[in-house]
Image (spheres, helix red, strand yellow):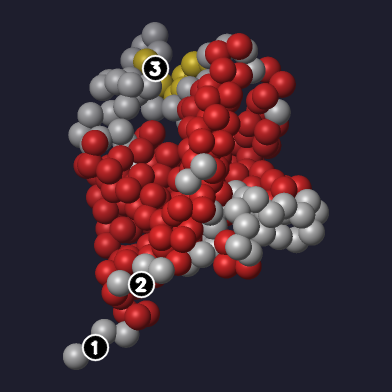
Amino acid sequence: MKTHPRSKLSVCLLLFTMLAGSAARAQDKPPASAPPGAPEASAPGFVYLVRTDLRDVLGGPVHWDSRQWGQFGIAMAGIGASALLDSTIRDHERNRHSHTADQVAKDFEQFGEAGAFGVMGTFYVVGLASNDARARSVGADGLIASVISGAIIAPVLKFAVGRVRPRDTEKTFELHPFSGNSSFPSGHTTEAFTVASVISTQYPAVWVRVVTYGSAALVGYARIHHQAHFFSDVTAGAVLGTATGLAVVHRNEEERRKYVLMPVVGPHGEPGVGVALSF
């Protein structure tokens, strides 16, 4: 009996979201920022986090030090080096149409669009149902990082660079800035690595990293296989998504540690709640 393609996609999405949801419960040990017995940090408002992240993440390069600019230079060199393989990989995938390769590409491509938001939604719902602040943070941070990387930075780069997609040209570096061509960087890969970096930062177990980054890499492979992007487009998307996800998580964790609710006892044994402020 033949399985309908939509059913296969649904099974794939369900499997990934189940893994994502189980990650929210798999870590018995709290993260380093919240050791056992420590008071629970009060959650800053979502709008406040969005405003803070837009300001600090997008404006971050203004305040980078020499080490951070060095890391940026290494990332740019890596993207440039990957471009040397653009033609070879494009030609190889153009002629490769095995059932396995086609199916893997088809099943995982969705995790660079709607599937990614399904994963983030799963974490947030699990966090609400189990009163797990870390799982809720994955959903919130993933959404904010996705807006910054996928709805702001990537579209601006796509429009400015104007690289023609491999399916539409025989060249590898056909650029028409501000023309509507949008091959560089890969938006699907950007989104997939954004979500992967958020999840794996909050849940750094090896198996979580393998599942998240492995799935994100397969999204990039799908875009190359479908002749939507060159290898360097996918590499740039992976760098952009990972960097944005890490920046948002680390920035928001700083905000969440600023205000901490803790139980206090009055002079006559009266219970109460105190607020510890960090500066």
- Along the viewing direction, whichever of 79 and 68 lies nearer the viewer: 79
* Mark 3 residue element: strand
Quarter of the image that includes the C terminus: top right
Q: Are marks 2 and 3 in contact (CB under 8 Å)?
A: no
Q: Earlier in the sequence, mark 3 or mark 1?
A: 1
Picture coordinates of residue 205 (x, y %)? 25, 35
Disc 1 crowd rating (10 Å Cα; few below 14, some 14-19, many 20+) is few
User: Can residue 12 be spotted in the picture?
Assistant: yes
Question: Label 1 to label 2, Cα distance in Å?
Answer: 19 Å
| Residue pointed to by mark 1 | 2
| Residue pointed to by mark 2 | 97
User: Can residue 256 be spotted in the picture?
Assistant: no
Disc 3 crowd rating (10 Å Cα; few below 14, some 14-19, many 20+) is few
Residue 278 as seen in the image, left or right of residue 269: right
Q: Is residue 73 above or below residue 80?
A: above
Picture coordinates of residue 275 (x, y %)? 50, 20
* Mark 1 residue element: loop
Q: Which is in the foreground here, disc 2 or disc 3? A: 2
Amino acid residing under circle 1: Lys
Question: Label 2 to label 3, Cα distance in Å?
Answer: 66 Å
* Mark 2 residue element: loop
Question: Label 3 to label 1, Cα distance in Å?
Answer: 63 Å
Amino acid residing under circle 3: Val
| Residue pointed to by mark 3 | 264
